Image (tube, coloured by chain):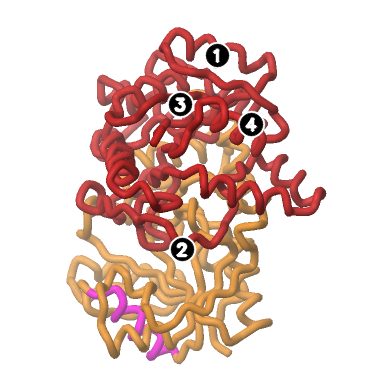
Chain colours: A red, B orange
Amino acid sequence: MNLYAIITARCSSERFPNKAVHLLGGKPMIEQVIIKTKKLKNIDGIVIATSILAVDNLIEKICKRNNVECYRGSNDELAERHRRTWDKYNITHAVRLSGDCPFFDLEIAQRIVGAVRDYPNYWSYETYSPIGTAISGHRSSATTRKYLEKQLQCYWQIPEPERMKIQECYVTAYQLPLDDPRMCLVDCSDIMPPQKTAIKIDIDYPLEMAIMNKVINHIGYFPDRYEDIERAYKEIKTI
Amino acid sequence: MKIGVIVLARSNFGRWPDKIKAKLAGVSMIERVIERTIHLHEMDKIILSTTDYPEDKWLIDLAGRYGIECITGPPDDRGLRYYEAVKKYSLDYFMPMPSNNPLFDIEALNLTTAAVREKPGYDYYAYAHAHNIGGVLTHIVDKKIIEQYKKTGTDQEMWFLSKETRKLFLLHGLDNLEIRNKYLIDLNVAYPLHVAILNKVIEHIGYYPLRYEELVEAFMEMKEL
């Protein structure tokens, strides 16, 4: 098994240009994701999958500064970029992280890593939460090479106009909704009961970045656990 | 066919006891929710469901002021309170509306209600899959779901996940990427900071917004707090 953490990130976001390198807690957001990911135990490597566009040069520099791999591929063909990332590092299993979700809960991600190590024959691994109870940013997941191949096969079968639409919306092949009978659901409800995940923790808009900078200032450090963020949301009454 | 929206509200509850009284641009959150439900013009009934506790008497008065129906029920069983409202007002379908969603998407919920009238017979109706969305969309439920809850009794927080039925009508499936990427802002109010943020957003917009798009614009425009 070659288990990597793959972090997808890019700067050419329409909603929030340069989002990945915007300062969060005094460091570029992608660097905060890298620093937290480096705390994961039992993984074989970390790679940031970004585009070849010049705007993403800074992401590559940040990777070098933090001694993690950086794979640069097509900006338009995300599926191809992901496949090549897996190929280059001979990855068999990957924990999927996103450059816009620096507040992922370290303990939950660690549990996903544990599930992959303990039960390597599943096709994918997801945090278990009943429908409608986990809002954005709270799920962690891992994928296997086998499953990625299945998704890519499905992706390339989509007729051209629809596939282009998928690209325009920046949806990766990983996100294609396929039925997957071999999914390992990892129960994390003891760490984080679903009804507690009432705060959106990924960052899509400039205002969300500003909010999270306030939260970090209040906490006094960059949080590894969701409960720190929750405490801040309770304590901060005015802005 | 009779469709109603049921707003559940009570004081002194949960992680933030006075939450429904929190002010959004000078008006309490529960009033904001009620005012917004009045824009759900496809609805036959707007019902406020609260408890018999003396501390909730003001909610009964509030419903009277807005000219909407009010029912009281058991404080610790939300499912039962939905059931009793559905029964009392003979609803065929109902939209459960939490009192902490003061900025739900009116247009999307009007379209969802219209879909129920056009294509009756499903157990749940939703504008889009609520995977990533907080406080923006809710669903419409066939009365039989809540009747089953009454019969069988499940975890009251999870009444809508009743195993018996799962016939879902989605106006926009997961493959509708435009919709999937539209609803990314969480507008659910769970903590004091949520209220502080929303007040800043309303201040930025200049008025209490009726359209979800106005909120998206504000989230893009506001770079600092």
Q: Residue visible at 61% across and 79% down?
A: B116
N-term-proximal mark, 4 vs 3? 4
N-term-proximal mark, 1 vs 2? 1
The disc labelled 4 sits on which kind of residue?
Arg
Q: Which residues are magenta?
A: B77-89
Distance Cα–Cα, label 1 vs label 2: 37 Å
The disc labelled 3 sits on which kind of residue?
Ala
Distance Cα–Cα, label 3 vs label 1: 24 Å
Q: Residue visible at 28% across and 41% down?
A: A114
Which residue is the extreme one toward the right? Answer: A161
Query: For the residues tagged 4 and 3, is the chain the same?
Result: yes
Q: In the rendered image of this protein, does residue A126 appear above or below residue B138?
A: above
Chain letter belonging to callout 3: A
Which residue is under mark 2?
A: A181
Distance Cα–Cα, label 1 vs label 4: 15 Å
The disc labelled 1 sits on which kind of residue?
Glu
Q: Position of residue B70 (x, y in %)?
A: 37, 78
Which residue is under mark 3?
A: A210
Nearer to me, B79 or B47: B79
Res. B192 in view: no
Query: For the residues tagged 1 and 4, is the chain the same?
Result: yes
Chain letter belonging to callout 1: A
Which residue is under mark 4?
A: A81
Q: Magenta region's main secondary structure?
A: helix
